[in-house]
Image (tube, rainbow, N blue to C red):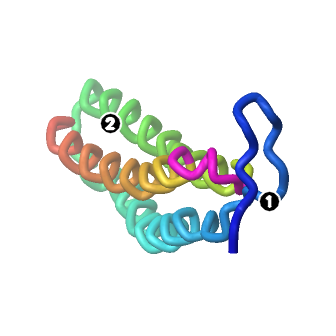
Amino acid sequence: MTFYVPPPGMPATMDDRHPGAWIAPCIATVITVIVAPFAFTVLMLSPMACDSCSQAGQDRFGVLFWSFAVGLLIPVALLVISWCLPWRREYLAARITLAAFAPGSLIGMLLLFIQLLDSVH
């Protein structure tokens, strides 16, 4: 099976579709769907860590809480972009990179949130 490779400067055709373009976003989606409920649970249980905080500690916790809550949209955006890129060979590296950053950013933000939660007191 051969694929048409257009000469430089010529537009690509449907013949250069990559047959395995769905693999990286699919794997990233599965990993993210497994890790996201845990991250959300940690977020929702974290206010108990600041029950006995002073007003300044509660203010710092509020900023940390909402930063992480809004930051949970980053992996979702990365997954959506990796799925929506055209399924051509020229976008393969971008698709794999975005797909890898989706669960990686979720895990990284979760670890950072847990680490910064100790500094609120």
Q: Which residue position is annotated with label 2?
A: 61
Residue depicted at 71% across the width and 62% down the height: 3
Q: Are marks 2 and 1 in contact (CB under 8 Å)?
A: no
14 shown above or below 73: below
Q: Nearer the viewer, residue 66 or 35?
A: 35
Q: Amino acid at mark 1?
A: Asp
Is any part of residue 15 visible from this angle? yes
Q: Which residues are magenta?
A: 87-94
Task: Report the side of 87 relative to 56 (left or right).
Answer: right
Which residue is outermost to the top?
Answer: 56
Q: Residues within 10 Å of mark 2 (few under 14, many from 20)?
A: many
Residue 54 location (% of width, % of height)? 23, 32
Q: Amino acid at mark 2?
A: Phe
Residue 94 location (% of width, % of height)? 54, 44
Residue depicted at 71% across the width and 56% down the height: 87
63 shown above or below 51: above
Quadrant in the rendering for residue 121:
top left
Q: Which residue position is annotated with label 1?
A: 15
Q: Quadrant of the N terminus?
A: bottom right
Q: Nearer the viewer, residue 61 or 13?
A: 13
Task: Report the side of 85 relative to 119 (left or right).
Answer: right
Look at discs 2 and 1 and give the one toward the viewer.
Answer: 1
Mark 2 falls on what kind of element? Answer: helix
